[in-house]
Structure formats: structure tokens, C-alpha cells
Amino acid sequence: EAQVTQNPRYLITVTGKKLTVTCSQNMNHEYMSWYRQDPGLGLRQIYYSMNVEVTDKGDVPEGYKVSRKEKRNFPLILESPSPNQTSLYFCASSPYDLSRAEAFFGQGTRLTVV
Amino acid sequence: DAKTTQPNSMESNEEEPVHLPCNHSTISGTDYIHWYRQLPSQGPEYVIHGLTSNVNNRMASLAIAEDRKSSTLILHRATLRDAAVYYCILSPTGGSNYKLTFGKGTLLTVNP
């Protein structure tokens, strides 16, 4: 089954403790992205990757890092999480340019930073 | 980026058709119109997209106005499972487009 898998689904952590949210897709898609969703602000893009070793900032990249060492994986790294990073995170993948292709989203990771 | 305007909420009855409108008066000639939906506690899900002509797929139909300043997502027979937030998104071409800009969307309630 074609899917984007995120782990963990739920995470509670403390301020400053490094964490990684994993994202994996099994569709051989070139493009992957991370979004965060907050009440009243909607979904906003954090980072995206056009292919292996090629990443770029989205609209809200501060406090986040990403890497794309393999095509299927695109982890989101929070080096020093803060309470304002409490949010619902979604990973997405697409075969190519989003103007013509559909994006596939993961089920989400609900992160709470205390 | 060109903006879209959708009603905050709509209500429908089960097994009846639903027409979800979207206004995009500043759309450019190369913007695709995409629709996604987000069911409760899930990630967004692609529904349909089109450029100029009306489009049909197994989930829905997309009717695009002749001047492209508005479009309508049509669910032919709403089910309880269609209750979700529906997002109308303009997706530009003419360069690499790696972002979906989500607005507030329309919350669709389906009554049994």
C-alpha cells in the first residue's frame, strides 16, 4: 500500500531535549516536505526536499533541521525544542512538482514540548 | 500568491449532493486548482485538481468557471465519512512548485 509513515504519532518532551520525528515513503517520490498545523494558522511548510541531499527552507524553518540521505526518508530534527514548537506535524511526499501532482500526507505527529 | 476564498462551514445531508464553492478572482493563467480534504485526526488527503476543464474522479467532480475565477467541488452523494475540512488551493506552474498553501478551508458537516 502506498503510504507516508511518520513516527512517533504522539510525543511529549521537555524543553531542550533533542528529538527526531521520522518520515518514510514507499512510493519512490522525489519530493518530500514537512508542515506544521496550528489552530488559527493552518498548515505551514517548514522544510522541503527536491531529491536526495537537496533541501530548502519553507515558511517557518527556525528551530528545525532536516536531512535527506536516502530517497525514502526525510527526518525532522528539533535540536533544542521549545514550547512554541508544540504543534501537529505532517510529512508529505509527491512524485514531482505539486502544480500537477498530488501530495501524500502522513498521519501526523502530535508534539508537546513542556 | 493568488488567494482563495471559501465559506467557513457548510452542512449537508447524507446521500445528497454537496457543492463546495471556492473563489479565486486573482488566479493566473497557469495556476492549477487543487482540492484537499482533512478528516478529523488525519493528514490532508488529495481530492482532485484541474486547470481549465471540468474534472471527474472516483471521489468527486471539479467544475471550473469559464473565466477561472471560481470553482466548485462536487461530492455526488455525501456520506458521513465525507465530513472534513475541504481546502481549495491554487498551485502555480512556470517554475518548481514545492509548497501547498493551505487556507482555512470549509468545514463540511454531514447529517445522517
Image (cartoon, helix red, strand yellow):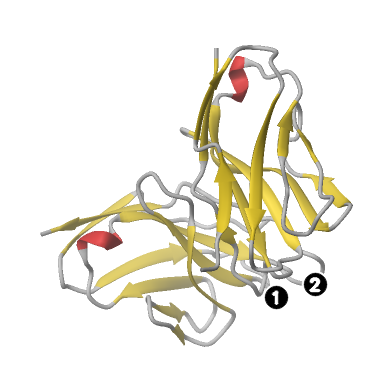
Q: Is residue B98 visible?
A: no
The quarter holding residue B73 reads bottom left
The answer to whether A36 is drawn above or below residue B76 in the figure is: above
Report the amino acid beneath label 2: Gly
First-in-chain label (2 vs 1): 1
User: The numbered mark 2 sits on a residue in which chain?
Assistant: B
Secondary structure category for the residue under label 2 = loop
In this picture, residue A84 sits left or right of residue A54: left
Q: Residue furthest bottom?
A: B53
Q: Residue at x 72, y 42 (%)?
A: A75
Going by the numbered disc 1, the residue's amino acid type is: Thr
Measured as percent of width and height from the top left, residue B19 is found at 30, 70
Q: Quadrant of residue B92?
A: bottom right
Residue A82 location, x and y as percent? 65, 16
State whether discs 2 and 1 lie on one chain: yes
Residue at the extreme left of the image, as rendered: B112
Question: Residue B45 at x, y = what percent?
Answer: 47, 60
Q: Which residue is mark 1?
A: B30
Left or right: residue B32 compared with residue A39: right
Res A99 visible: yes
* Residue indicated by mark 2: B94
